[in-house]
Image (spheres, rainbow, N blue to C red):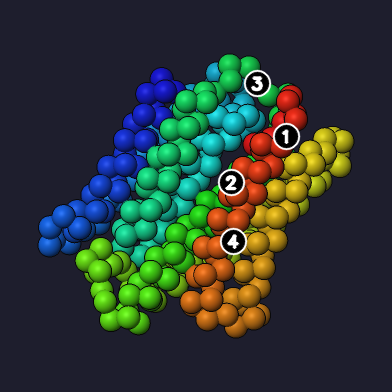
Amino acid sequence: MIAIAHLVAITSYVGAAALAAAPLARPVRAPVRLVIAALAIGVVAHMAALVIAARQLGQLPVSGLGPALSLAGLMLAATLLAAEIVTLDVTLTLVGGPLAAIVTAIASISGIPAAAPAAAGAWLISHIALSFFGIAAFATSAAAGAMYLLEHRELRSRRIAAVLRFFPPLQTLDRVNQVGILVASLSLTLGIALAATYAIAHNALNIPEIIWGVAVWLAATGLAFGRILGGWQARRAAMGASVMFVVIVVLYVAVRLNVSVGQAFL
């Protein structure tokens, strides 16, 4: 059932992206309601997969590569769904939909462990949920930033590519970029605070996760302060979000490749 629910979620995310790309094939408006409905179906199916896994384990599956990626994919899709509902513009789904599908597919291939992880409790689960929600918000902000940079460059060169004709206005992309990075900073701050108190209380320090988590938090918080206190303009903020998200993804891969055998890391 878990694999089937993941498959439904993956199919829905890809379908939502395909629907959002309809204007690229023919001169029609994107079916906003259908895209949102497809994303909603995917999110519900994804949640069902984790609920089934939680019943089997007796707790929320959050430890290990498969469960961690599945939760990350769900958070990304849920954040994307919320952004599309608020803006009523589904262009972000062109990027976010395939990304959520890829992450969920890797999670499904990796599998959900049959045994419950050793660490448990609302404390740890809250930390992981907040952290993944923050990363999902960061990904949404970065996607909006990348789209802003592409559209801005085309407008300045006065060469509007066909695909960019269906992008949302620059103001909408800038708003999504700003809200996403502020939500990411707040969520990651709370998540890291919970992680620190959990590690101290249970003597469960994990250096690789600390290094990567602090790097992500510094990136998101630095971007948030740049917008609030630094007076960053839209283009600079979009560049910062896009570049920093790529940096933290590369850092994740680098840290994970250097984790010793048997050492836990998301």
Q: Which disc, if any, is residue 116?
A: 3
- Identify whether 218 is placed above or below 101: below
> What is the crowding at mark 2: few (fewer than 14 residues within 10 Å), some, or many (at least 20)?
many
Horizontal relation, residue 108 to residue 221: left or right: left
Q: Secondary structure at mark 1?
A: loop
Instruction: Pinpoint residue 222: horizontal percent, then vertical percent.
Output: 67, 68
Q: Earlier in the sequence, mark 2 or mark 3?
A: 3
Look at label 4 and name its amino acid: Met
Look at label 2 and name its amino acid: Phe
Q: Residue under circle 1?
A: 259
Q: Earlier in the sequence, mark 1 or mark 3?
A: 3
Contact (CB < 8 A) between labels 1 and 3?
A: no
Q: Based on the displayed image, in which of its 4 quarters is residue 166 positioned?
A: bottom left
Q: Earlier in the sequence, mark 3 or mark 4?
A: 3
Q: Residue under circle 4?
A: 244
Whether residue 155 is visible, yes or no, is yes
Contact (CB < 8 A) between labels 1 and 4?
A: no
The quarter of the image holding the N terminus is top left
Look at label 3 and name its amino acid: Ala
Q: Earlier in the sequence, mark 1 or mark 4?
A: 4
Instruction: Pinpoint residue 45: horizontal percent, then vertical percent.
Output: 38, 33
Residues 18 and 172: in front is 18
The residue depicted at 76 percent of the width and 52 percent of the height is 193
Q: Secondary structure at mark 4?
A: helix
Q: Residue under circle 2?
A: 132
The residue depicted at 60 percent of the width and 83 percent of the height is 231
Whether residue 53 is visible, yes or no, is no
Q: Secondary structure at mark 2?
A: helix
The residue depicted at 70 percent of the width and 61 percent of the height is 218
- Mark 3 or 4: the one toward you: 4
Horizontal relation, residue 252 to residue 94: left or right: right
Q: Based on the displayed image, in which of its 4 quarters is residue 12 positioned?
A: top left
